[in-house]
Image (cartoon, rainbow, N blue to C red):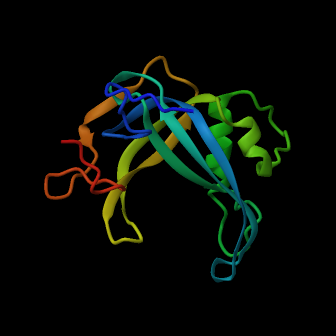
Amino acid sequence: MAFTFNSQDIKAASKVLGYGGDYRVKVQSAEYQGKDDNPQSKQFGSDKFQVVFEVMDGSEAGATIRHFFVDDSSSTGYTPFRYREINAMFAGIGSVNDGAAIELANVGQFLPGQILSVRVNEFEKFTTSQGRIGYSPNVAAFGAPIKESVPDKSNPRPKLNGAETSINPGLFMH
């Protein structure tokens, strides 16, 4: 089968979030990542999963936000708190009844397509395995879907040396 070239269809598969703010998002994907067995924190058997949210509207439409969830409710090494993010996400989605038992291993089956809102207050610095520095949005809160996304233009994603960083450096269009 032949490929049909289209010079007008060259948008990257995902866009980085440019500003903090409140965003109406759709769950693009959810991936269960197994149990977290961490002897150092005495955290054993905690389910963990990653969700990719996509901004649905406004100037940041198409931007993706990744968030890692951990059900640490059974942890004995510290006072559990990360499980509350899972509760907040499900409350934002609004289709889960109190007391419902949810098999987190199945998040990839029931989360994609769900709509809610997220608040991003800051960007977390990270370093890739290749030594490149980047910034990822840090979700501070989850809520019911809002009418429209509201970027906080006073809270831009940090830039290094005044230039955007990319996980895929060297991909330039001339």
Please tell me which residue lies in front, 137 or 12.
12
Query: In this rendering, would 172 be left or right of 1?
Result: left
Could you tell me which residue is drawn at 55 percent across and 38 percent down?
142
Please tell me which residue lies in front, 77 or 169.
169
Where does residue 86 sit, x and y in percent of width and height?
66, 46
Could you tell me which residue is drawn at 31 percent across and 64 percent down?
133
Query: In this rendering, would 42 be left or right of 141?
Result: right
Where does residue 77 sit, x and y in percent of width and height?
68, 76
Could you tell me which residue is drawn at 69 percent across and 82 percent down?
39
Where does residue 146 sit, x and y in percent of width and height?
50, 22
For residue 43, what is the image quadrant? Answer: bottom right
Query: In this rendering, would 111 be left or right of 60?
Result: right
Labels in figure, total = 0
Task: Point out the residue furthest to the left here.
Answer: 162
Query: Does 55 sit above or below residue 121?
Result: above
Where does residue 71 sit, x and y in percent of width and height?
70, 57
Task: Point out the residue furthest to the bottom here.
Answer: 40
Query: Does 9 sit above or below residue 71?
Result: above
| Quadrant the C terminus occupies | top left
Could you tell me which residue is drawn at 63 percent across and 58 percent down?
81
For residue 14, what is the image quadrant? Answer: top left
| Quadrant the N terminus occupies | top right
Query: Does 125 sit above or below residue 94?
Result: below
Task: Point out the residue furthest to the top here.
Answer: 147
